[in-house]
Image (cartoon, rainbow, N blue to C red):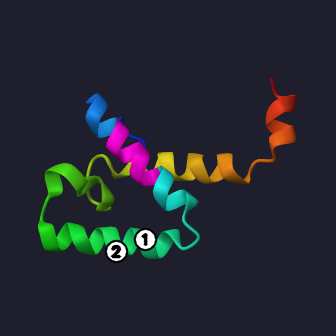
Amino acid sequence: MDHRAAPSLSSEEKRRIERVARCVARDRDGDLTEKLLLRLLSITRNGRRWGFLSPDHPLHPYYLQQKVSERCRILRPRTAAAADR
């Protein structure tokens, strides 16, 4: 895994990536959703807006981090979250 720092994100990019990661993480078939989004990216060629979905994009690691974080948050029992406070 590449641990280099991600390029700086604008607030708009950050919100967009976090929103997509949250949607994919919460979807019962998130892998299919992600594949459909990647297909749309290839059709529309709107890499500037949605390029982070592609594994070779510099913002892809941030997207993956947000997706995993959201999945963990969903799976984490509420009682454990409350005990940490």
Q: Residue at x 19, y 50 (%)?
A: 49
Asked if residue 27 is positioned above or below residue 77 in the image, the reply reads below
Q: Which mark is residue 51?
A: none
Secondary structure beneath label 1? helix
Picture quadrant where residue 51 is located: bottom left
The stretch of residues the image draws in magenta is 15-21
Contact (Cβ within 8 Å) of mark 2 with mark 1: yes
Q: Residue at x 54, y 74 (%)?
A: 29
Q: Which residue is mark 1?
A: 33
Q: Which mark is residue 36?
A: 2
Q: Amino acid at mark 1?
A: Thr
Assess whether residue 51 is covered by the magenta stretch.
Answer: no
Left or right: 61 in relation to 25: left
Looking at the picture, how far across and down is residue 8, in whole percent? 27, 30
Left or right: 68 in relation to 40: right
Task: Report the predominant secondary structure element of the magenta stretch.
Answer: helix
As rendered, which of 82 and 67 lies closer to the eye? 82
Q: Is residue 2 visible?
A: no
Picture quadrant where residue 53 is located: bottom left
As rendered, which of 61 and 72 lies closer to the eye? 72
Q: Amino acid at mark 2?
A: Leu
Left or right: 16 in relation to 42: right
**Furthest residue toward top:** 85
Classify the position of the C terminus by image quarter.
Answer: top right
Q: Residues within 10 Å of mark 2 (few under 14, many from 20)?
A: few
Assess whether residue 18 is covered by the magenta stretch.
Answer: yes
Secondary structure beneath label 2? helix
